[in-house]
Amino acid sequence: MDGDFVIGGVFLLHFKMQTDIYNYTIKPDAPRCTGSLDARNLQYSRAMIFAIEELNNSTELLPGIKLGYEIHDTCASVLVAVHAAFKLLNGQGSQFYNHDNCSTSGMVMAVVGDAMSTTSISLSRVIGSFNVPLVSYYATCACLSDKQQFPTFFRTIPSDQFQADALAKLVKHFGWTWIGAVRSDSDYGNYGMASFLAAVQREGICVEYSVSLLRTDPPSKIQRVADVIRRSTAMVVLAFTTSGDLRVLLEELTREPSPPRQWIGSEGWITDPYLMTYSFFAGAIGVAFQNSVIPGLRELLLDLSPADVAASSVLTEFWENAFNCTLTKNDNPQKRNCDGTEDIKNLKNPYTDTSQLRNTNMVYKAVYAIAHAIHNAVCQETNVSTQCEKDKKVESKQILNELKKVKFSRNGYPVSFDANGDSVAFYELVNWQKSESGVIELVTVGYYDASLPKEQELQFNKKITWMHGGTQVPVSVCSESCPPGSRKVLQKGKPICCYDCITCPEGEISNTTDSPDCSPCPSELWPNAQRDACFPKPVEFLSYDEVLAIILAAFSVSGACLAIITAAIFFHHRTTPIVRANNSELSFLLLFSLTLCFLCSLTFIGAPSDWSCMLRHTAFGVIFVLCISCVLGKTVVVLMAFKATLPGSNVMKWFGPPQQRMTVVCFTFVQVLICTVWLLLSPPYPMKNLSTYKEKIILECALGSAVGFWAVLGYIGLLAVFCFVLAVLARKLPDNFNEAKLITFSMLIFCAVWLTFIPAYVSSPGKFTVAVEIFAILASSFGLILCIFAPKCLIILFQPEKNCKKSLLDKTKCKE
């Protein structure tokens, strides 16, 4: 149709190109389209005509200017598309125009098309060289966003990059990490799948297989693709294909049904009503362009008079195919003649179906976008009206520049282009659901809006039906998720989604699902049994609440009471010979020190503190030295007493009570000095022992200086050995009651206990180290008090007849 400005249109009206065999003797004919007519794409071309007629009747946009159109068929062929591009550039009737002396009326200002990305690439490369913009309504390949290669390309449909992101987020939303992928072996499928694979890789999703096909492929290849789907373990299959390519695959799958699969669809086929006739496809979910309403379009589509149909070869072909009749008499004897009774209003056909004007609206918006660009180039806005110059000389480059700035809204649908010529990405999420009658219907269950904040683009507002009408989301994973407390270990030679779950090692946790690593707990924390959280380690020390501590404390108090009772018995019988003969002053001092020995063991029980750590070791060291000093004094007294009985001996005057006291004080002072140096230089302190046990903390007293500790013990041991040697020397003295024998036994027990203590102390773990030390103190203390004082108390209390000077000398009983 002629006009002041002409808009070109290219549509996929037929499915294939006429193939001719040339003998190189005649000029080849121009490429032609053949095959069956695509009724849906016919609707697209009629939508373009409707939009142009609507614009020609508008008083707001391009008033007084008539738009024309020139529509060509590409039949999905690059060769035909290039030929159509040159026709559009040459103008009507293949006439060449010279802008210097010819009118620009009738020249193509812009082109609407094409449906396929491959043909759109060819079109854009040709007409782009002449700065003629191409506005596609269905070419979604992300490659067309490259402005260096396609500077004049625009589209009212979102780029596949947005669709790939939407599909990847859809897969991630339902927890599918193991999927299969099928694509059309075309620019649409290959570029779209490449974008999708990159998107799912970022989301940590694995693709088991990625296969391609075309509807023109041999049946053997289609069968191989179907077999890959049948043998796969992925429950979810994403198809980034056109409806024509997917149709041949579905026909192959129906021959030998595959296990149930959950299909995810791209916009290329998810809204195709023909594919909905495959019942095993029920439950498919995918992204589709926004459903739209175009007022008045249905009336134009149905308003086909016989004259209109006869005037157009395309409409004639459509009419004859739709009603199975012929408009040309005797053209096909097998078909009846169209007699005028055909009613297009009752025709159920993709051409007449206006319930899902998704892609059709993209054509409508493309025409209006070009019209707005022309309007901005030739019209001037005034306060009262709009003036347009239909004879104004306009070049396609001006339309190109104006098209970049277009921003408007039509029927409530916004139209604008970003720097790449892409429109705003908005998809409906659609689901194939079976109705009560068993018919598969397309139901919108949500949407994807790329303009929303991250992680909020995907929204669902209706219930989804899955494969076989299920309500539970299908599971499609290579390996089940690893629960908290374990980590993933990749299976050799397989994708990252295939892994084994290994329990975290001792002392480490993982608190997230599918954790790649386990992290160690801090030093004072330890994992729970599930190894998914760290909790404070139990603190262990010898507490008064424990049975062991209670027993040791009972023995300690009992020992102290025993020493006090013994002292009381000795004090009450202090005038008796047996008490007076055994150096009562040193005996009382020894009993006092033994009482303190028993009681000092209590300082080892309970939680260690700064004071208790310093007190327990130093008090123990000083008190034991005091105790051994007293025993040593008593031993020396026995030896000196024997020497004093020898003729001419005068040794007792050199070791009387003052000397005995001085000896005890001097020996004890040395230990006090050692302890003082120890406390000043490096005193014991409380510490948390984290190394003995991994799962608990031992509260104990660190020695501070190991040298100081062993010096204290060594000094005690030195005195004990010295005392033992003296006692051995005095054990066979002629007295009836020789105390040296008792001291020998006590020192033997003392030395045996402490020699055993050293390896036990070093090897005992945790709180048992403290228990061993308490046991050594109590055992040696009981050894001293029982060996030295028990025989005396036995005589005092139960054998008073032996408590006399004569009995002590010659073993005879005292006189009554």
Image: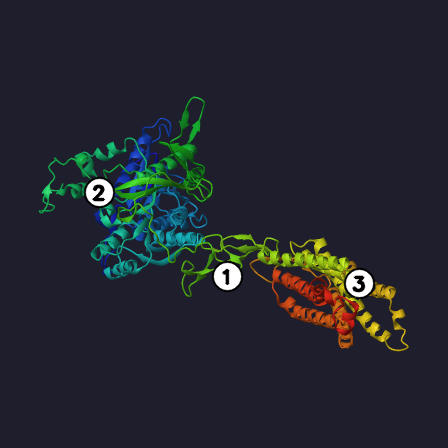
**Foreground pick, 236 / 359:** 236
Q: Viewer-nearest of labels 2 and 3?
A: 3
Amino acid residing under circle 2: Val
In the depicted structure, whether residue 178 falls above or below residue 422: below
Q: Which residue is the site of mark 3?
A: 584
Q: Secondary structure at mark 3?
A: helix
Q: CA distance from mark 2 to mark 3?
A: 115 Å
**Foreground pick, 455 / 535:** 535
**Foreground pick, 60 / 716:** 716
Q: Would residue 665 appear left or right of 457 to someone viewing this image?
A: right
Residue 19 visible, this angle: no
N-term mark: 3 or 1? 1
Amino acid residing under circle 3: Ser
Q: Viewer-nearest of labels 1 and 2?
A: 1
Residue 56: image location, x then y, percent: 32, 30
**Foreground pick, 712 / 151:** 712
- Which residue corresponds to the image point at 44% horizontal and 27% vertical from the top-left? 381
Q: Which residue is the site of mark 1?
A: 505
Residue 742: image location, x then y, percent: 73, 70
Amino acid residing under circle 1: Pro
Q: CA distance from mark 1 to mark 2?
A: 55 Å
Q: Which residue is the site of mark 2?
A: 439
Q: CA distance from mark 3 to mark 1?
A: 66 Å
In the depicted structure, whether residue 706 falls above or below residue 103: below
N-term mark: 2 or 3? 2
